[in-house]
Amino acid sequence: MERDYRMKTLVLGLGNPLITDDSVGLRVAEALKPLLADRPDIEVSEDYWGGLRLMERMIGYERVVVIDAIQTGAAPGTIHVLAPDGIATQRSASAHDVNLATALEFGRQAGASLPDSRHIRLIGVEAEDTLTFCERCTPAVEAAIPKAVEAALNALAE
């Protein structure tokens, strides 16, 4: 009998639900929950806190997909799929100043049990407005949510 091995996976949407485009990671994670509900090997969660809390959340998982608003100068709503070596150059658009690359470095220096870099992806949604208090994303970012959901599902299929 063949064993069905699936990696223990965390899909984590980051952001602030009160800030316009900074809520996009939370919104994408919320859209993914029903799509992944039948997968006991995948936990889909949201978190306001990044930084060291992000590193703590990754401990014990074999694979991690993080969804967050980022700003690179690309058109708002652009979807970026980044591996750890590309993450270091990206700036998170949200209030959590310690980004994914820094969180990974801190965790590894501390000897934390983190996923191998080959199994970490950042789905970055190019933000337009991360300073306005509003429950909805800007139109370009709102329109990108289904594309970000698809990008996360593709990352999970790798």
Image (spheres, grey):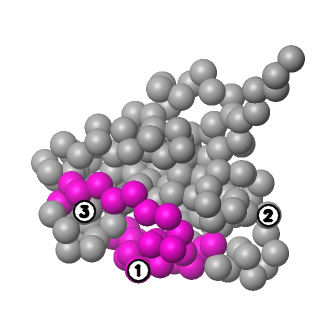
Q: Is residue 71 above or below residue 144?
A: below
Label 2 – label 3 distance at C-alpha = 31 Å
The residue carrying mark 2 is 113
The residue carrying mark 1 is 89
Q: Position of residue 40 (x, y in %)?
A: 68, 28
Q: Position of residue 74 (x, y in %)?
A: 19, 68
- Is the residue marked by circle 3 packed among few (<14), some (14-19), or many (20+) residues within 10 Å? many
In the image, is 95 to the left or to the right of 111? left
Label 2 – label 1 distance at C-alpha = 24 Å
Q: Nearer the viewer, residue 22 or 140?
A: 140
Give amino acid for label 1. Thr
Q: Does the rendering let one see residue 132?
A: no
Q: What residue is at 45 percent from the left and 38 percent from the top?
A: 153
Which marked residue is nearer to the observer: mark 1 or mark 3?
1
| Mark 3 residue element | loop
The residue carrying mark 3 is 127
Q: Position of residue 68 (x, y in %)?
A: 40, 58
